[in-house]
Amino acid sequence: MSTKRLIYLPLGGAGEIGMNCYVYGYGAPDAERLIVVDLGVTFPDMDTTPGVDLIFPDVAWLEARKNRIDGIFITHAHEDHVGALGHLWSRLEAPVYARAFTAHHARRKMEEQGANPDKVQIMGAWPEMRQIGDFNIGFLPVSHSIPESSALVIETPDGRVIHTGDFKIDHQPGVGEAFDRDLWAEASKPGVKALVCDSTNVFSGHEGRSESSLAPEIQRLVAEQPGMVVATTFASNVARVKTLALAGIAAGRSVCLLGRAMRRMIEASVETGVLDSFPPTISPDDARDVPRENLMLIVTGSQGERRAASAQLARGKYMGLTMADGDTFLFSSRTIPGNERGVISIMNQFSEQGVDVVEDTDGRYHVSGHANRPDILAMHELVGPQMVIPMHGEHRHLREHVKLAKSNGRAGILAPNGTCVSLSGNKPEIVEYVDTGRVYLDGSVQVGALDGIVRDRIRMALNGHVVVTLIIDEDDTPLGDPWVELMGLPAKGRSGSELTEVMEADLGQFMNRADDRTLMDDDKLDEALRRVSRQSAMDEIGRKPEVTIVISRLN
């Protein structure tokens, strides 16, 4: 019996949607050679992560084993799969592999963070394979909502694994590769040990629709509007951007792309050969001179991002362009859970301007890039794996996907982040658990989710902040009473007096009662002043603020 094993370990993306990072290993236990699949980000929100710029998977487990990592493979160029590459590469220092379009974005991510873009190597599509240690790996084309998405065919001494990445079954995606059933059947023919499979839409009971099915409805909508038409979608959905642009041209409108991400994606698509052509567009400067009824803007910001083009138009102006009564704004996208507040705010701002907002409530202007339940089941049947390992989904998605696999006689296992699964036997087996977590990009610094920084920020946001300053003379005698500065608190409390005056009076009374032992000990003095400050504020305003004590001793 072999002493080596094949393992699968998700560090991000299993138990959540976003922040994808998966590890495969082969070798003796605790000495496996490793490959990493995807290094993605998720995005913060003001409620739970105020001030944070991006959120990464915690790769401490990988960093401790960096000398065993043989490669990093990026399945496609969505931010939740490639967005952390530049930020985390220096901690892993392994060669990166991707197809041409994805590599274009991966190299830019590396350059932006000062890493060497030449570490990203381009691979062709399956059946091209690359031997990386004990793994023989190929990129198997699959349809999704961004060009050149790929599954991974991972051949190992213990059998073949297919990691689907994000996928849908779309035979007419418009841009990018159609789902090729024969190609997938060929890749599965030698027998597949494990299918590690996208779970995002496992609760959607109807078959997924093709991207190409949207064009007629979008063309009709754009043609019927009397004023300017503005549409937003995911910038990475190049097929949708092209469909929108073609609809504008067909309606006799000049088309202008607004937002750096939108222009960057189209330029990358042309440069890497994903797009052989794109409808003619005009610059924002020229757009200002076009009559409103003859103009269409395609803009970034479908998720309500404050700095994106759609949010700025909602606030009044962007690049010299404004919305007006009688214009139409189309959301050709779905709102990702958690972004509803920002999107609704934009909708209401447009409404106040007299703009008609059209959202996709019935699937006329948007289709998902992920496989629905019947398509997931079709993938199971096409690949015919011995076992199914659900990934890319919240816990409830993974659990439902396991049920789906088992209901059709396939072994399955629930493996959220940190669950190390052996794929070597006849069924998947949990062999250990690994500590996982999140790392925040806060400005230009990476901080741990448990470091307390964001927790303190939330506390200050909820409770306000008080700074108490006290000066102590050389003989341990206070030079006057402490004074107070407030941030984020009411100026007056229940008594009607200034809150600073009430707190300073209470602190002064405490100082008059304080004994020599307290006055000589900064820790005791800090604790006491903090307690008095919080109680004083509680009595006046019904809230205990965060308190910082500054004690200055004159030597």
Image (spheres, grey):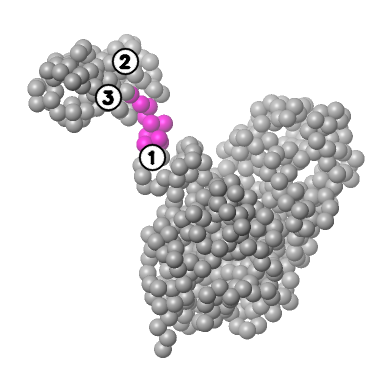
Task: Tell me which amino acid carries mark 2.
Answer: Thr
Q: Is residue 543 found inside the magenta-colored segment of the image?
A: no
Q: Is mark 1 on a helix, strand or loop?
A: helix
Q: Earlier in the sequence, mark 2 or mark 1?
A: 1
Q: Is residue 463 found inside the magenta-colored segment of the image?
A: yes
Q: Which mark, by number, is residue 453? A: 1
Mark 3 burial class by Cα count in 10 Å: few <14, some 14-19, many 20+ = some
Q: In this view of the protein, which residue sits in the foreground, 293 or 433?
A: 433
Gap between marks 3 and 1 measured at Cα: 20 Å
Gap between marks 2 and 1 measured at Cα: 27 Å
Q: Quadrant of residue 195?
A: bottom right
- In the picture, measured across the screen, residue 358 lies left or right of residue 60, that is right
Q: What element carries label 3?
A: strand
Contact (Cβ within 8 Å) of mark 2 with mark 1: no
Task: Tell me which amino acid carries mark 1.
Answer: Ile
Gap between marks 2 and 3 measured at Cα: 16 Å
Image: magenta residue range = 456-466
Between label 2 and label 1, give the one nearer the viewer: 1
**Residue highlighted by disc 2:** 500
Residue at far left of view:
516
**Residue highlighted by disc 3:** 550
Q: In which quarter of the image is residue 252?
A: top right
Q: In this view of the protein, which residue sits in the foreground, 527 or 208?
A: 527
Task: Tell me which amino acid carries mark 3.
Answer: Val
- In the picture, measured across the screen, residue 298 lies left or right of residue 248, that is left
In the picture, the quarter occupied by the C terminus is top left
Residue visible at 52% across and 82% down in the picture: 157
Residue visible at 66% across and 40% down in the picture: 301
Residue visible at 12% across and 18% down in the picture: 475
Please, what is the dominant secondary structure of the magenta stretch?
Answer: helix
